[in-house]
Image (cartoon, rainbow, N blue to C red):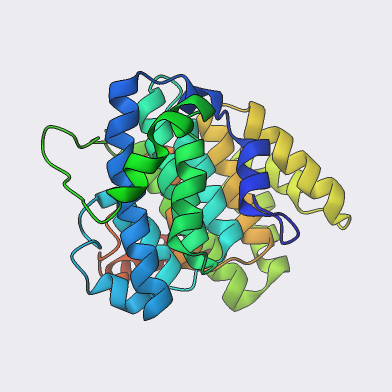
Amino acid sequence: MIQSKETITAYFEENFDLDRIRTLPITDKFKLINYIKLVGFASVISREKDLESVKESAYYEMDSTFYLLLSLISSGVSADVISQIIEAYCANFEDSDIFYAKLVILGVGALMIQQGIDRDSIIGYLILLLGESFLRQNYERIHAERDELEITDENQIKISFKNFDYTYRKMKYDMLALLKIKREQGHEKVRDLIFNHYGDKNLKLYFRLIDLKEKSISNEIFSKLMADSPNMDRFLVMSCRCIVEEWSILEMHYLLNAIIGKYTRFNKPYSEVMAEIEVHEKEILSM
């Protein structure tokens, strides 16, 4: 998670394996240039007008991953939440350097757009991620062609997200229901449900570890568990973090989808999500 005192570049240098991008084949690097240009176009519109104007442009739906990141930003989701969403998706791409690279580049770009950084600065840094040698040999040509963009079937990078595992689906809506209960009925109520009624021993364990008075220790435990645990455990750890810190339902919904590795189109009606959460909330409260 990006800290308020960190720059975007320092955060990515510290928390991501950028060598996976630098060592990509040259053909993959040139495919990524299209996405760097896409970020550049969006940044110009955002600086000259606003993020809502980006959503009305042709660039908004040109790529589904960028669409999701821009949607989160324009909805007011904070940089620390978006950075955790990027981290969670990247953890699903251990076997695909090109998917990892695309998500990092679009993630860096989206966060820079959120901060209002200018296009040339964004493009310069993103090309550097492809390697210093690549930058020296290609920067002038790429910069001269920064107003040319053509993403086609042949040169696009289609990230393969996972199908929804229904084990996760039920658990996700249970966790969202617990967050809703916390927001409406308070911390002690949700503690009682988790420890005395819900019946998941791993959820109990992780809630105890995250729900600590000393936040620096809680944050350290969270970081280690998220780095070293299996996927379902990471799912539960993140759920506990969201419940304890009382994040918004929207933020938790997209964070958990990112951990699962499932892509969710942002325009799903929020009322549908809330209706399903309420079904699970009733089940939990009746336990």
Question: Taking the image as drawn, is residue 175 in sight?
Answer: no
Give the camera-side residue of 155 and 278.
155
Give the camera-side residue of 29 and 275.
29
**In screen coordinates, is 15 left or right of 89?**
right
Residue 203 location, x and y as percent? 62, 43
In this view, the residue farthest toward the bottom is: 49
Give the camera-side residue of 119 and 141.
141
The residue drawn where x is 70% and y is 59% is: 191
The residue drawn where x is 37% and y is 38% is: 102
The residue drawn where x is 53% and y is 41% is: 87
Residue 91 location, x and y as percent? 50, 32
**In screen coordinates, is 59 left or right of 110?**
left
The residue drawn where x is 41% and y is 39% is: 139
The quarter of the picture where residue 243 lies is bottom right
Residue 236 location, x and y as percent? 57, 42
Give the camera-side residue of 91 and 168.
91
